[in-house]
DNA sequence: AAGATTCGCGCATACCTATGCAATGCAGTC
DNA sequence: GACTGCATTGCATAGGTATGCGCGAATCTT
């Protein structure tokens, strides 16, 4: 009954008194088919509202034209943007998107069977981890993967990341140059390479310049930033420069500072990471490191599709540099509080 | 070569010297298969990493187990939350999600062929429009649809919405009760039922109480709210109560007010709609109408899956009431500015 | 005009799973 | 011992598309 409504290529063929194969070729603009028949077929197809069955096609061609996207933290402000760009670009390139979501806490292992059942031609994993066991399974199945903004420690799968470590260094240099002296870092989730690298770049640079870095735990959320900043400011010798693992944490931190009557951009400087739209709001004017999202997405797709079409499965890591965007949340001139000379010298 | 890696049910059958049909039945725990063979098959399947081909299965069963989700405004803060909940719930229920994104400006018509090619068993359209022509096509194909937070004027497809009109009334009553006198509305995108209904409920109630409502255009974004509030406050006789089409607009409005030195919650009251996480931030403390997201999603899935399984295709509209959550952005006691008595009386 | 070439199309099959129906083997019954 | 009945398994086919290969007809060649 259901299939009664569905028009198939066989139906078209029978109506026109030709072979199904001719219909198939006519619809794919095969040059071997005479222009006249081709037009006849296409006209009838349009008239009857024929829609090819992607499943049957995939079975035949061994290509699903499906890309799986696994995403966690979908509700944090950065990733929806990524997801939208990814899907719209994939659509333009003729691919469809099978969406999976997971909590970032554990690996995506349990989702993998589903991805494989649906014969995804490729897989993009954003802000989630892939166990090395699974990555082997994928390689065995010949399904290319690229990790987005995360990379596997064993380098078993390709990945595209913002140069998080470089970003951390950028922040350190900027804060040093403007004469800050008491540094802190509010972390993101601990098991993420993003958090690790941002911290590493920041801290290494500062320690090389002779400064210690106080560390507060966090998890990439507003609430965590709010709480951490509260802790930082409630101590004697509170920091005058706070780098946050991402923007939303930074915004939480700013709100906490305000609540305590501490002026952001004067008494304490705050820097974030991502450059989400909110960072530009007049309420925050957050100085931050902009992730080169467009370039990262382009790069991911290029790598993924290259791997699918060329079957070059070699793993490949790419780090794309971010850029510092200056707004109002950092005190620029040293105000006699810190060792100005040292800060400047380090630039 | 690709298929060399793929293990099929035929492979299993040959290895075990049994028929493919037996394998199929063994893996689906068919009771007719002897326990011993069943175990043998399942063991081998696990060993070889057999993954059933969902396409072949769908071809055979005429069920794709795929739900298409069409979403626009993915980057506005409300919808990622919806998307995440939808996909995770669908996964739990055994469905997969095919994701399509579109800009909310035009209909989803161009995406429809893709949805049909992939034989989606059902379709959820969030914050986007479906032309009546397309809705007919879907009915003809027997594909159930439910619109999320939008409904078609011709009632040709099912829909689940927040009771936006009721929400607008809630806001009006609340503002009247607290003695406001100069009302304004900052609109969302004009072609949306959400915007229309929120405005209608609000305005109708206020006009019934004898108040006029000043209207500013908007489009559900921060920037639009910011600009609109700027316009409102730059006039003589500026409003003391502003209802915004959604939270993000309201937050833009609040920032604009602050920029102009106007105290929100005292000189001007602002109310939003949605109750996104940001609304609770200490920087905003936005009083707003909470959308019953969980209930809306549950209801959508219930309707959709009911339609898929029962083939009851009747169109069905469901409106779920929201609730006012009080925070700090509304002045509560009349401050001698307005006709307090009248406001109170209307509660 | 007969053979060589090209053009247009059809036949048959692969892709993989699910399932109705037939068949087999075996135990139990009278 | 023959027959009924049940428990297991196999056979065959559907589902819709793409494509290698072959065939007939039309065009061209000389």
Image: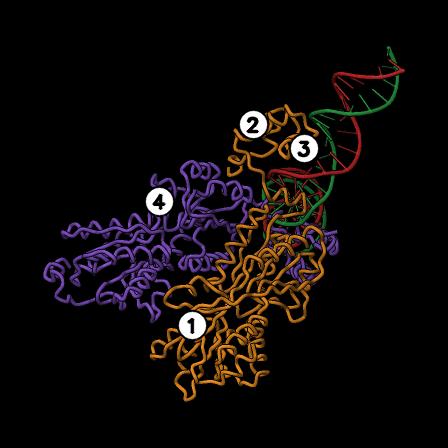
Chain colours: A purple, B orange, C red, D green
Residue topped by disc 1:
B329
How crowded is the residue under tag 1: few (<14 C-alpha within 10 Å), some, or many (20+)?
many
Whether tag 4 and tag 2 are in contact, CB under 8 A, the answer is no
Q: CA distance from mark 3 to mark 4?
A: 43 Å
Q: Nearer the viewer, mark 1 or mark 2?
A: 1
Residue topped by disc 3:
B30
What kind of element bears circle 1?
loop
Q: Mark 1 or mark 2: name the one nearer the start of the chain.
A: 2
Work out whether residue A110 can be spotted: yes
Residue B272 lies left or right of residue A53; in this view the side is: left
What kind of element bears circle 3?
loop
Seen in the picture, residue C22 relative to B190 is either above or below; the reply is above
What kind of element bears circle 2?
helix
Q: CA distance from mark 3 to mark 2?
A: 16 Å
Instruction: Using the image as rendered, state which of residue C6 and residue B40 is in the foreground.
Output: B40
Callout 4 and callout 2 share a chain: no
Q: CA distance from mark 4 to mark 2?
A: 35 Å
Q: CA distance from mark 1 to mark 2?
A: 63 Å
Q: CA distance from mark 1 to mark 4?
A: 38 Å
Q: Position of residue A177 (x, y in %)?
A: 16, 61
Pointer 2 chain: B
Residue topped by disc 2:
B43
Q: Which mark is residue A191?
A: 4
Pointer 1 chain: B
What kind of element bears circle 4?
loop
């Amino acid at each position: 009954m259901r299939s009664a409504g569905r028009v198939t290529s066989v139906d078209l063929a029978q109506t026109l008194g030709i072979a199904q194969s001719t219909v198939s070729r006519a619809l794919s603009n095969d040059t071997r088919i005479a222009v006249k028949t081709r037009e006849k077929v296409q006209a009838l197809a349009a008239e009857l509202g024929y829609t090819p069955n992607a499943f049957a096609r995939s079975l035949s061609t061994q290509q699903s034209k499906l890309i799986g996207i696994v995403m966690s933290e979908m509700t944090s402000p950065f990733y929806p943007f990524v997801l939208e760009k990814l899907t719209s670009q994939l659509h333009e390139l003729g691919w469809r998107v099978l969406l999976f979501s997971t909590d970032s806490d554990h690996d995506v292992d349990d989702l993998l069977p589903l991805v494989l059942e649906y014969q995804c031609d490729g897989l993009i994993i954003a802000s989630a981890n892939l166990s090395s066991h699974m990555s082997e399974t994928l390689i065995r199945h010949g399904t290319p993967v690229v990790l987005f903004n995360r990379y596997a420690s064993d380098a078993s799968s390709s990945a595209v990341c913002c140069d998080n470590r470089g970003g951390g260094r950028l922040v350190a240099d900027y804060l040093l140059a403007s004469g800050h002296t008491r540094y802190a870092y509010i972390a993101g989730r601990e098991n993420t390479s993003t958090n690790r690298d941002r911290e590493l770049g920041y801290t290494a640079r500062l320690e090389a310049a002779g400064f210690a870095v106080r560390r507060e735990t966090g998890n990439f959320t507003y609430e965590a930033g709010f709480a951490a900043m509260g802790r930082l400011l409630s101590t004697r010798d509170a920091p005058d420069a706070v780098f946050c693992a991402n923007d939303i944490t930074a915004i939480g931190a700013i709100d906490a500072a305000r609540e305590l009557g501490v002026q952001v951009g004067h008494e304490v400087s705050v820097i974030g990471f991502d450059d989400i739209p909110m960072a530009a709001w007049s309420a925050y004017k957050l100085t931050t490191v902009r992730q080169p999202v467009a370039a990262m997405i382009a790069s991911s797709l290029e790598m993924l599709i290259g791997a699918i079409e060329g079957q070059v499965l070699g793993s490949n890591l790419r780090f794309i540099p971010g850029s510092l965007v200056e707004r109002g949340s950092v005190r620029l001139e040293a105000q006699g509080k810190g060792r100005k000379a040292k800060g400047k010298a380090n630039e």
